[in-house]
């Protein structure tokens, strides 16, 4: 038996690995390095195009529990993530290049996996797993739409995170710490009062935006939303999202701020 897996991202690499570990021959089709999207930078599999954090690694919440279940199932992604993790408090964050390189090496060296480079424009015969993700090439996306219906939409929005220099942060106001003091104190927490948050929210919702690229779409992915889109959904949306102060007490006051930017 042979199974074709299309796409060598996180899902495709894991699917190929799990099949191969069970003695099933896998043909892994990946368009890189022959063809890349504007979001791709390397030739490696499982390339992280956005955050290097895989979120919480704590057993008392759903995403942490899922990671432990994957570890017990022999997940390649979790093996490589654990081997290349960097300090991030209670979260599992990785050295993105080291992580992708390790996944690629493990996949390419597996005796039951054959990697075939090049873009896939037609779905092959036989048993096929399509794991091409939001960066599916136009040709394959059109083919999928023809099979699944015109309402099928595949889109990607590059919500790029800004880079800040350490010396630009006023550490007389900010402090190092992790939420609920879990793990090590690896984050810089920048607190906001209610007045400061109000001014920030107003500027953010009225600021000029950078034009989107051709491969981006205004139909944003709900699970990874640009901060300005989130802010426009309501004044308090960010306070219950990425700027929530829960579990972060300002050591100067002993109280939770109105909002916190974690770096």
Image: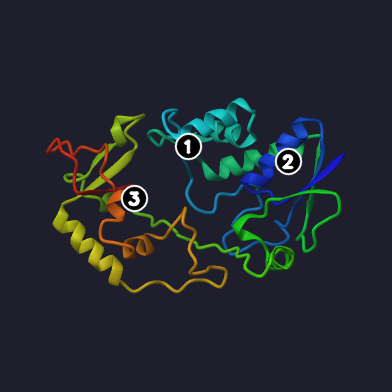
State the residue position of label 3: 241
First reached walking from the N terminus: tag 2 or tag 3: 2
Percent position (x, y) of residue 111? 81, 34
Horizontal side of residue 236 vs 141, given as left or right: left
Tell me the crowding category of disc 2: few under 14, some 14 to 19, or many 20 or more residues within 10 angstroms, Cα based: many
Percent position (x, y) of residue 117? 77, 54
- Quarter of the image for the N terminus: give it: top right
State the residue position of label 1: 63
Are dots 1 and 2 in contact, CB under 8 Å? no
For this rendering, which residue is in front, 257 or 105? 257
Kindly report which numbered mark, 2 or 3, lies closer to the viewer in this rendering: 3
Percent position (x, y) of residue 3? 81, 44
Q: How many marks?
A: 3
Query: What separation in Å lies between label 3 and label 1 (alpha carbons)?
Result: 16 Å
In terms of secondary structure, where does tag 3 sit?
loop
For this rendering, which residue is in front, 122 or 153? 153
Tell me the crowding category of disc 1: few under 14, some 14 to 19, or many 20 or more residues within 10 angstroms, Cα based: some
State the residue position of label 2: 16
Query: What separation in Å lies between label 2 and label 3 (alpha carbons)?
Result: 34 Å
Tell me the crowding category of disc 3: few under 14, some 14 to 19, or many 20 or more residues within 10 angstroms, Cα based: few
Kindly report which numbered mark, 1 or 2, lies closer to the viewer in this rendering: 1
Is 182 above or below relative to 141? above
Task: Tell me the residue at 82%/35% (across/down).
Answer: 24
Percent position (x, y) of residue 123? 80, 58
Furthest residue toward top = 72
Task: Tell me the residue at 73%/68% (across/down).
Answer: 146
In terms of secondary structure, where does tag 2 sit?
helix
First reached walking from the N terminus: tag 3 or tag 1: 1
Horizontal side of residue 151 vs 164, given as left or right: right
Please identify the quarter of the rendering in which residue 109 is found.
top right
Is 118 above or below relative to 242? below
């Amino acid at each position: 038996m042979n199974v074709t897996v299309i796409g060598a991202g996180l899902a495709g690499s894991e699917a190929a690995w799990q099949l191969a570990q069970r003695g099933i021959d896998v043909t892994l089709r990946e368009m890189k390095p022959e063809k890349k999207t504007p979001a791709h930078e390397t030739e490696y599999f499982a390339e992280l195009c956005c955050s290097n954090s895989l979120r919480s690694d704590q057993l008392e919440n759903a995403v942490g529990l899922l990671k432990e279940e994957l570890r017990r199932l022999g997940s390649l992604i979790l093996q490589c993530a654990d081997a290349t993790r960097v300090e991030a408090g209670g979260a599992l964050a990785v050295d993105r290049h080291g992580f992708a390189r390790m996944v690629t090496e493990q996949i390419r060296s597996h005796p039951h996996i054959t990697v075939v480079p090049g873009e896939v424009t037609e779905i092959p015969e036989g048993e096929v797993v399509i794991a091409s993700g939001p960066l599916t090439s136009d040709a394959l996306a059109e083919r999928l739409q023809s099979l699944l219906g015109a309402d099928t939409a595949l889109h990607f929005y590059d919500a790029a995170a800004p880079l800040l220099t350490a010396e630009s942060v006023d550490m007389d106001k900010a402090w190092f710490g992790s939420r609920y003091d879990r793990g090590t104190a690896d984050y810089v927490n920048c607190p906001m009062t209610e007045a400061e948050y109000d001014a920030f929210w107003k500027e953010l919702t009225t600021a000029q935006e950078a034009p989107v690229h051709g491969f981006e779409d205004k139909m944003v992915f709900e699970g990874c939303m640009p901060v300005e889109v989130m802010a426009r959904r309501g004044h308090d949306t960010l306070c219950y999202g990425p700027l929530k102060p829960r579990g972060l007490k300002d050591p100067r006051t002993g109280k939770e701020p109105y909002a916190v930017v974690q770096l």
